[in-house]
Image: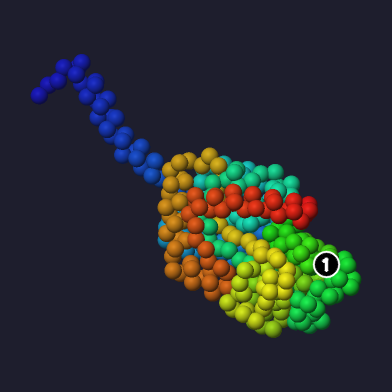
Amino acid sequence: MIYPRRAVLPLLIACGGLASVPALAAAANAYPAQPITLVVPFQPGGGTDAVARSFAKAAEQHFPKGMIVLNKSGAGGAVGWKYVLNQKPDGYTLAVVTGEFVTLPLLNLFDRSYKDFTPLVQLNADPTTLVVHNDSPYKSVEDFLAAAKKNPDGMNVGTPGTGAVYDVALSAFEVKSGTKVTHVPYPGSGPSLLALLGKQVDAVATSPAEAAEYVRSGKMRLLVVMNEERVPEFKDVPTAKEKGIDVSYGTWRGVAGPKNMPVEAVRVLKEAFEKVAQDPELIKSIKQQNLGYVYADGEAFEQKMAMETDGYSKVLKELDIK
């Protein structure tokens, strides 16, 4: 059949439009078309790095292009988070976020907050503990407190950075126990524990999980956990509340991206991360490292941050921690 020229043009345009539909659909579904970088705001060797690497490995089956773990430490986590915010918000640069996401802004140590990010998934939660070298003269938390009261400011305690959750927990511990120690900041729990191993500090405020290997090998000893309950692996270690010190603080870890990421990227990430977070192998890996496994989706994770921001602001004011 021969079509009039006037009829052919609309037909060609229509066909061309139809031909472009699969291409547009393919383009829309292309994410992720390249590896995703997961920024860890602390040095290798700590619990945050361990959670990140376990998560990245479990995510491989959902992200064919892979996930790259990049450590950018400094300023209690702020350096790594600012790095993420300075990248294009295209869904290819994400951050591992921790409890410092809440404490640093409240202490004016980070000029952004969780509201500048898109929370995607929570993976973990851990309490704070005080750990000493196995050769330390402090065999119990009572020994530690007695020494601190006898020599105010003479006790050096390592922390993973000023304003870190463990640093804030240590301050609260001082206030509630009527003691005073000198905080020695390090770029993460890993470096602070190495300093303790070298006897450069008297104790370290960290999590039981991050100190676990040193404790198991007989190189370090836990004195107390700032938690509502004792830690299963270290049932002989008392809680602060058991010793009359009303302190219960810890950190958590999860993944977030910057605000204004493409809607499709956020959808893909949240759907995939929900599956990754509940992968039996990931849960097993986290627990094998004595890290506490806790799952929450992006919405619940964001609500947690909002609640903790309110809670910590009241605590910091009450304890006059600046």
Residue reaching furthest to the right = 151
Mark 1: amino acid: Thr
In percent of the image, x 69 and y 50: which residue is there?
313
In percent of the image, x 66 and y 65: which residue is there?
248
In percent of the image, x 78 and y 67: which residue is there?
177
Q: Position of residue 97 (x, y in %)?
A: 60, 55
Which element is circle 1 on?
A: loop
Within the image, what quadrant is residue 243 found in? bottom right
- Residue 300 visible? The answer is yes
Q: Nearer the viewer, residue 23 or 115?
A: 115
Q: Position of residue 283 (x, y in %)?
A: 48, 68
User: In the visual, does 269 lie left or right of 310?
Assistant: left
Up-down relation of residue 266 to residue 21 (above or below)? below
Within the image, what quadrant is residue 174 found in? bottom right
In percent of the image, x 63 and y 61: which residue is there?
251
- Residue occupied by mark 1: 179
